[in-house]
Amino acid sequence: MYRSHILICGGTGCTSSGSGAVIEALEAELKKNALEEEIKIIKTGCFGLCAIGPIMIVYPEGCFYSEVKPEDMEEIVNEHLIKGRPVKRLLYKETVEGDSIKSLNHTDFYRKQMRVALRNCGVINPESIDEYIAYDGYAALAKCLDEYTPQQVIDIVLDSGLRGRGGAGFPTGLKWKFAAANQADQKYVCCNADEGDPGAFMDRSILEGDPHAVLEAMAIAGYAIGANQGYIYIRAEYPIAVERLEIAIKQAREYGLLGKNIFGKGFDFDIGIRLGAGAFVCGEETALMTSIEGKRGEPRPRPPFPALKGLFQKPTILNNVETYANIAQIINNGAEWFKSIGNEGSHGTKVFALGGKINNTVLVEVPIGTPLRTVIEEIGGGIPNGKKFKAAQIGGPSGGCIPSEHLDVAIDYNTLIELGAMMGSGGLIVMDEDNCMVDIAKFFLEFTVDESCGKCTPCRIGTKRLYEMLEKITSGNGTLEDLDEMEKLCYYIKNNSLCGLGQTAPNPVLSTLRHFRDEYVAHVVDKKCPSGVCKDLLSYVIIADKCKGCTACARKCPVGAISGAVKQVHSIDTAKCIKCGACIETCKFGAIVKM
Amino acid sequence: MKNKLETLPFKGTPEQKEQLCAIIEEYKDVPGALVQVLKKAQEIYGYLPLEVQIDVAEGLNVPLEEVYGVVTFYSLFSINPKGDYRISVCLGTACYVKGAGDLYDSLQQKLGISGGGCTPDGKFSLEACRCVGACGLAPVITINEDVYGRLTVKDLDDILAKY
Ligand SMILES: Cc1cc2nc3c(=O)[nH]c(=O)nc-3n(C[C@H](O)[C@H](O)[C@H](O)COP(=O)(O)O)c2cc1C
Ligand code: FES
């Protein structure tokens, strides 16, 4: 028995901010004080509060420390663990109220959330199958094999109304039903852990924090459709998640929860990992399967759908990580329970990776139908530096922007589509008044041009042309007619591309054109970038009143565009200026501005 | 192309070749193993020059053009050598809205190379990547295994000076 447990996040976010060194320092301190037998350190997955990492929770008190450093460990061990006095200065400020300390569950951040897919993340040690089992792990698989026929499993999933969390929101039960109906000597269950949306990290966090939940669900899916082999397709850029999955698969095999004759019920199922090598299109289902086959990950025309001819031409289902993370809960608690969460038509919860210009860059899980405002203002803590909210980008390169007048929209598959965005996989990036919406559209188009696989012309050439038009606009050479041309091209690409990549690629342009047309107009008519982002439309100017003639800027300018004698007002030669911003940073008097 | 090969001759060692052969042997009969093998090959050599691609093609008995097609398709693979210090600027959305684009521009200027390139002394190479998964620290750059977050253009000189 340990008298105290210390949970430290070992997810990518906290590892990047140095949690490895903190763990080492803590281990050394415990050893120094001969406390190793009394206090146990548990390396968990993501808590969701990555921006204030590394994060550490001490139980039984539930004290939540944030931004801890290796140097702090001595104090925490001496004060808290030996003398029982929590170190207030290191506690997460939201949990301290006067003299009392709240548990994390009572902070604004957690109160508005509901954790279904993330229930074990940050709670259990993801490298221990025993801990997963202690939290009802593999009970759902046992229940399925014991009590339900494959058809009954499919019916429960259908009944629950669970929709795919990877983007399109296709009903999961229906997908399983189709694949189950197709007879074949071999079928496959695949998991999409490619997480191509740049700026989203929820699937990664689930795999890092609770890998067994995905394995268990894939086995259940295998039982339901009659498959005995699964593949997890995961980005090679996620080394921690890959390692945790490898450990989890090995443990599950040792416990007989993967492999031959699971639970003695004559059901065989095993899972392999396939590493994606960095191609956004490989998140698309047919491309993903071609990529698992070891080829260039190009999409194939559908039909035939994967439920009939998928991986290696065999019936296959593909679901997203988060979709799977809901399955065991649905089996354990029943379809009715799941249906009671969320909205009419879309049940359950959705995880979002909230980032960008927001106080709390966090992973949040909320019931579907929660207003966007709640997520951004209450959970995310609003916009930093007193800036004004401009838009939330949701759905990544396939999605769109939601402007402030729609901040009260209930987040749901259908409402987002109506606004020209989409649920996507769950990236939610907040932008403030300093972000230029034309520039953001260009950013996403640059991404799709880069990532278009080149197989079909509307996507390969269309996105390139679209990008060039945006470049023309941001460099001040656009016209009003270009805006109409651009809109036409968008619809052409959407309607004629082979796969979802091209069909959704114009969305960032269409949605910004719809909600922020005035910004486009400012670029083409006034030749101004209202947010001061597009370099070609700005010039750097020295304000004569503020300039002290200290020459710092002139010395810093890499192209010698600034001139002026000591103690005299300086000036910038706009013809030479490359708008790098070095002078603005250097000036101590705030005398240089972009206009 | 020819020029490039002359200035950067392939310097594979017999040990590396041995490792590669072992990997090819291990995966020879696994269907769809090409990407996995290439990934491991890149871990051995640091990049995938034509010489290595030929070895893989012959070893796995797939056409060279298929190997080349796969290598050039995935952003993980590089046919050019990398610097001793690989600088990677995250251009994921969360980082971009917080100014990662400026970091990228500034690094190109400071190092005098463009994205994807390598300094002539082979010390630094620069590339962009899409979300390293540490969005809480945005904007983020990584140099080999080190992660630097919450950066502004001002911080770059100090960071480069460490290497
Ligand atoms: C270009 C493109 C990229 C995609 N990327 C992903 C991804 O990274 N992760 C994901 O789960 N689904 C992605 N999808 C959606 C998948 O094609 C597929 O619909 C999904 O994985 C199915 O799982 P679900 O029904 O559980 O959502 C992408 C689709 C397209 C067209
Ligand atoms: S967008 Fe840069 S780390 Fe996620």
Image (cartoon, grey):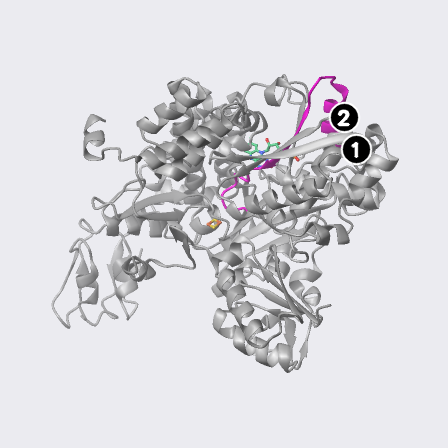
On the image, which quarter does residue A522 sit in?
top left
Q: Is the residue marked by circle 2 packed among few (<14), some (14-19), or many (20+) residues within 10 Å?
A: many
Where is residue A565 shown, x and y percent of the image? 11, 67
* A212 sits to left or right of A480: right
Q: What residue type is labelled 2?
A: Lys
Q: Quadrant of the C terminus of chain B?
A: bottom left
Q: Which of A228 and B73 is in front in this view?
A: A228
The stretch drawn in magenta includes residue A174:
yes
- Which residue does the image show at 75% across and 48% down from the upper left? A137
The disc label shown at residue A158, or none: 1
Q: Give the range drawn in magenta.
A: A173-200
Q: Mark 2 points at which residue?
A: A177
Q: Nearer the viewer, residue A102 or A331?
A: A331
Q: Position of residue A415 (x, y in %)?
A: 66, 41
Whether residue A370 is visible: no
Residue A322 occupies quadrant: top right
